[in-house]
Amino acid sequence: MPSKPHATARHLRQNLATLALCLSLAHCSIDALDPPEFPDGGLLAQSIPPALGPLAALAGNYHTAGSTRFGDAVSVSVVRDHVSIFASNTVYAITRAGCLSDHRLILEGSWRRANALNTGLLRLEVRPAEVAEALCTLDTVIAPELLDSIALIGTLGEGSGEPSTPLSLLLRKPLKDMSNFRIVAHRGGCRTSDECGAAENSLEVLRMAEFLGANAVEIDTSITKDGVPIVYHDEAFSARLTQGNYCFGPINEFTLAHVRALCRLENGEQVPTLEEALTVILDETDLDGVWLDIKNPESIQSVIDVVAPFRARARAENRGLTLVYGLYSDDMIDAYLAATPDENAVCLIELDPADVRSANCQIWGPRWTRGPMSDKVARVQASGRAVAFWTLDELDFLDIILADAKPNGILTNRPGLVFQRFQELGTPPAGPSITLDGVRP
């Protein structure tokens, strides 16, 4: 039955009021963007997962044909049973792989444009058939010439509609070595305003970060009234990042119990403690770096007390996870030097290289707006330290920094974009490598 005129007008007024409110808060989310899903689980519901090691053969740089949604070139990453596709126009796709009973290897998932409402379903099939069968049965050695001819052939759609637009990805070259380059996902991988399906600084987005193109994450931490470090970007709770009628005000005025009782993140997620976040990173991901953005000097010792056991665990488990204390001001540096970090702790300073040296830190973190500063970057790297720019999302400037500065890492809200641009024009850094116990030449 058609809506009554007064009901329609009321709905319009409500939407306009919501729009005005969220604009005043610098964050809008009238209609949350939920990634579309295949009905009844799609073909993946009828599949079994392929062996994870051999699936890495699909990683590489591809030409595209058919749909222009991804532009003319993409980079493909494989993390466990997830296959992600990254384009330079900020479109990306996250799929999962499955083997059907006839040995076909299919990829199903969704694509979207970052910080926009464009999204849809995607289904691809691995060709040639001999490669798919070998990856699914593991009883055949794949000839090198077949690996060189890998293609991903299928269709994509718009919204929740069945994919129907042809899309082909044709392998053109392998991935560059990224073992010494850190793509650091800002706030865990996805700002709340990007509506990627998980709120920033949530456990859920930490689990997604690798599929978004990152091999490291940056998370923000402050301490509660009872001294517990939690992961949250701002120093005060507000409607910009949280739900809850009584979730408003400085974090240090809330006990952890009050946070748990009164506050939820954008999609209803729980505000995590730093301990919970590090547990997820260590136990459930292969991420190899964490940049800890500590929000105030008073938090530093409490953060160190939480981090130290995780550094010990990572070392005992031979897990290459580097935990980095981020210091952005003179007050932070003074507080860090007065604290008691564990031996071989790794720190990053956002000020000048001289401050990095005087504080005996291992990483310089300049803001990208200062330009590539290629000579200064080279001198820092030659001194045995690393350089990671922040927070860089714009394509043109990203290309300049990658090509001219050749940094060891980039902090970004667009890890998939950085992944793809590094593959196109990045140079694996010749400088030091950041490790669990500091910088290795």
Image (cartoon, grey):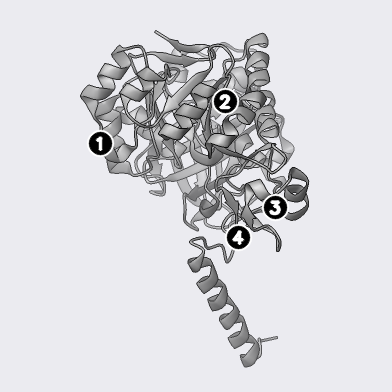
Q: What element carries label 1?
A: loop
Q: Looking at the image, which residue is at 68% across and 19% down? A: 309
Amino acid on which disc 1 is placed: Gly
- Sequence order check, earlier mark of 4 and 2: 4
Q: Is residue 265 visible?
A: yes
The residue tagged 2 is 287
Give the image quarter of residue 441: top left
Q: Could you classify mark 3 by the number of other residues whose Cα lies within 10 Å: few (under 14), some (14-19), or many (20 or more)?
A: some
- Sequence order check, earlier mark of 2 and 1: 2
Amino acid on which disc 2 is placed: Leu
Q: How far apart are marks 4 and 2 (CA)?
A: 30 Å
Q: How far apart are marks 2 and 1 (CA)?
A: 28 Å
Q: Which mark is residue 371?
A: 1
- Sequence order check, earlier mark of 1 and 4: 4
Amino acid on which disc 3 is placed: Arg
Q: Which mark is residue 239?
A: 4
